């Protein structure tokens, strides 16, 4: 979202829409006041208040999070009290509790609407200070669901269930003409009639059935090469099940292990390139 620029803080403003539910996610970084940047807390409160006036009237859910560099845990701190009053005036609530910085105090915050907090839009807010950083990792759970999977209806036939002797007997019963007087019929007509006969045989031996298939989104790291490897694994599995020899079992297990290793390698390479 293009929500403008501010002198006293940096931000990233995102809108995520899933299943017709919109969530506004705003990440804030407010550098600590210093002579170098010349940013005062009073200036931040004025700019942040003007930003909140736009955010709170926007439709959908709202999640504001980031490093505010305000000791909100200090009940005697004047800046913290003004910040708390600002949130209350906008019907917002801050959910992080406990120290989030190596030197103490709660600096990293998660803020949402007051009316959304009781219905567990955000829950299980925890601080993880095991990382090699002076700030804690803030983790929480929000009920943004995955997109609904789309469904496709396909017509399928169980061709494998047809026995060759049944197919031969059904085709033998076909008569290209019903009487001697019809022998002058054209080759094209004979071909069409034979095609209809084969269709009738298929409908009798392997009737068409409708099947609903759930279209799952493919993982971004899943390549066409992995899809072919998976297809080969399934083929080897069927060969082992049809002929349960030890050698077929070993070939299948080897291909399956290789496929899983390639999946892990592709996943690792993808996330490394993203990072």
Image: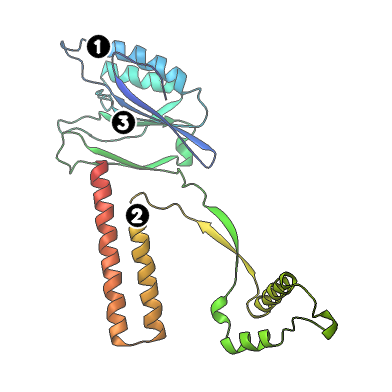
Q: Residue 103: horizontal and vertical position, in percent?
A: 14, 30
Furthest-front residue in view?
A: 184
Reply above or below: 36 against 121: above
Relative depth, front residue between 22 and 40: 22
Q: Return the residue nearer the eye: 206 or 3.
A: 206
Numbered mark located on residue 40 in the image: 1
Q: How far across and down, in percent of the image, does residue 35 sit?
A: 15, 10
Q: Which secondary structure, mark 2?
A: loop
CA–CA distance in space, label 1 to label 3: 19 Å
Name which residue lies at 31% across and 76% down.
252
Badge 2 local density, few (<14 within 10 Å), some, or many (20+)?
few
Cα distance, mark 2 to mark 1?
51 Å
Residue position marked by numbered label 2 in the rendering:
223
Mark 2 or 1: in front is 2
Tell me if label 2 and label 3 are in contact, CB under 8 Å: no
Which label was assigned to residue 109?
3
Looking at the image, which residue is at 19% across and 12% down?
Answer: 37
In the rendered view of the protein, which quadrant contains the N terminus? Answer: top left
Residue at the image position 46 percent from the left and 25 percent from the top: 91
Q: How many marks?
A: 3
């Amino acid at each position: 979202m293009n929500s403008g620029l501010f002198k006293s803080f940096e931000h990233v403003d995102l809108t995520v829409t899933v299943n017709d539910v919109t969530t506004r996610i705003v990440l804030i970084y407010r550098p600590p006041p210093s002579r170098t940047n010349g940013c005062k807390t009073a200036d931040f409160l004025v700019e942040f208040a003007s930003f909140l006036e736009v955010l709170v009237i926007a439709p959908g859910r709202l999640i504001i999070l980031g490093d505010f560099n305000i000791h909100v845990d200090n009940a005697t701190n004047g800046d913290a009290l003004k910040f708390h009053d600002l949130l209350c005036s906008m019907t917002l609530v801050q959910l992080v509790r406990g120290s989030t910085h190596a030197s103490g105090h709660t600096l990293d915050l998660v803020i949402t609407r007051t009316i959304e907090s009781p219905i567990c839009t955000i829950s299980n807010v925890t601080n993880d200070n095991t990382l090699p950083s002076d700030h804690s990792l803030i983790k929480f759970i929000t009920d943004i669901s995955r997109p609904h999977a789309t469904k496709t209806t396909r017509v399928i036939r169980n061709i494998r269930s047809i026995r060759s002797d049944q197919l031969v007997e059904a085709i033998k019963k076909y008569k290209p003409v019903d009487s001697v007087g019809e022998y002058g019929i054209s080759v094209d007509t004979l071909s069409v009639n034979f095609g209809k006969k084969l269709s009738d045989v298929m409908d009798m031996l392997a009737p068409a059935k409708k099947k609903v298939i759930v279209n799952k989104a493919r993982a971004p790291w899943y390549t066409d090469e992995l899809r072919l490897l998976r297809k080969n694994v399934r083929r080897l599995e069927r060969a082992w099940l049809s002929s349960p020899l030890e050698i077929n079992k070993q070939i299948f297990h080897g291909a399956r292990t290789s496929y899983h290793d390639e999946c892990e390698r592709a996943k690792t390479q993808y996330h490394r390139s993203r990072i």
